[in-house]
Amino acid sequence: MVQVSIESETKHMIPYYLFIGSALASLFISYWLSRRMLRGAKPVVKKGGRLMPPEIGGIILFMTLAAVFLTFFIMYSIQHGFLWGRERKLFGVMVAASFAFLLGFIDDRKSLHFSVKLAGQTLAAAIIPLAGFRLDFVTNIGGELLYLPVWAGSSAIVLWLVLMMNAVNLIDGLDGLAAGVVAVGSFTIFLLGFQTNPLIASGALMLSAALVGVLPFNFYPAKFYLGDSGSLFIGF
């Protein structure tokens, strides 16, 4: 009985080293990539010949989170079975987030029509319920549960993700605003979930730390912008 209790307690211990290690790695890599990529980046020529800072922030964030996410989650999974049974959901998140980044990357260079951009955002968001994520109920003001049919819950997930991507994209007009807001929001998600859902919490902390790493270069006067690739990616 004692042995089972100890094993059970150990299995559900909060993986502090995962949080600390992934956060430090995200912070270091994003800062290092920012300095490295800024050296060879060229200003963006807008209409009228106006020069703007390069839009490389999204590439930096995507590369950082892809490297840290895969390294730490796979490493922890091998040791503790952290991911077993959740592969479909994690794969769905990675594919959808990569699609959101790619959509923004193309838009930064080709200026996609809003309808095409919205269709791409909807497609990226639709991957999430297909990957197994569900919204089964919501609570009203009185705290009572309102159960949702599958189609309504899935539609709500897609709508919310599309709204978040566009919201972050819209506030990316001031230096450091989008990155700062999402960094604070992600850290809040980490604080809310680190005791109950280490998987979500560690991902949120990685994102927050990666954003802190690029903020010194994104604050006014910005040396580079996130671009749509960055704003859609972190909004997602």
Image (cartoon, rainbow, N blue to C red):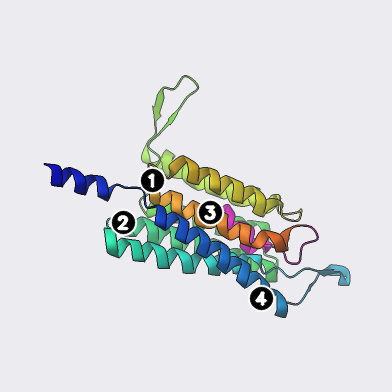
Classify 10 Å Cα crowding around label 2: few (below 14), some (14-19), many (20 and above). Answer: some
- Residue 232 among those drawn in magenta: yes
User: From the viewer's perspective, is residue 185 above or below residue 93?
Assistant: above
Q: Which residue lies furthest to the left in this view?
A: 1
Q: Quadrant of the C terminus?
A: bottom right
Of labels 4 and 2, earlier in sequence is 4
Question: Tags 1 and 2 in contact by the CB under 8 Å rule?
Answer: no
Q: Residue 37 carries which label?
A: 4
Closest to the camera, between mark 3 and mark 1, is 1
What kind of element bears circle 2? loop
* 9 or 37, nearer to the observer: 9
Who's the residue at 40% across and 64% down the image? 72
Q: Mark 2 points at which residue?
A: 82
Q: Is residue 109 toward the left or the right of residue 121 in the image? A: right
Hey, what amino acid is under mark 3?
Thr
Q: Name the residue under label 3.
A: 122
Of labels 4 and 1, earlier in sequence is 4
Q: Which mark is residue 197?
A: 1
Residue 102 visible in the shown view: no
Q: Residue furthest bottom?
A: 40
Q: Position of residue 218 (x, y in %)?
A: 72, 60
Who's the residue at 67% across and 62% down the image? 226
What span is colored magenta in the figure? Answer: 220-236
CA separation in Å, label 4 and label 3: 31 Å
CA separation in Å, label 2 and label 3: 30 Å
Hey, what amino acid is under mark 2?
Phe
Hey, what amino acid is under mark 1?
Asn
Q: Where is residue 159 in the image (x, y as percent from the top left)?
A: 53, 45
Question: Tags 2 and 3 in contact by the CB under 8 Å rule?
Answer: no
Of labels 1 and 2, earlier in sequence is 2
Q: Is residue 51 toward the left or the right of residue 1 in the image? A: right
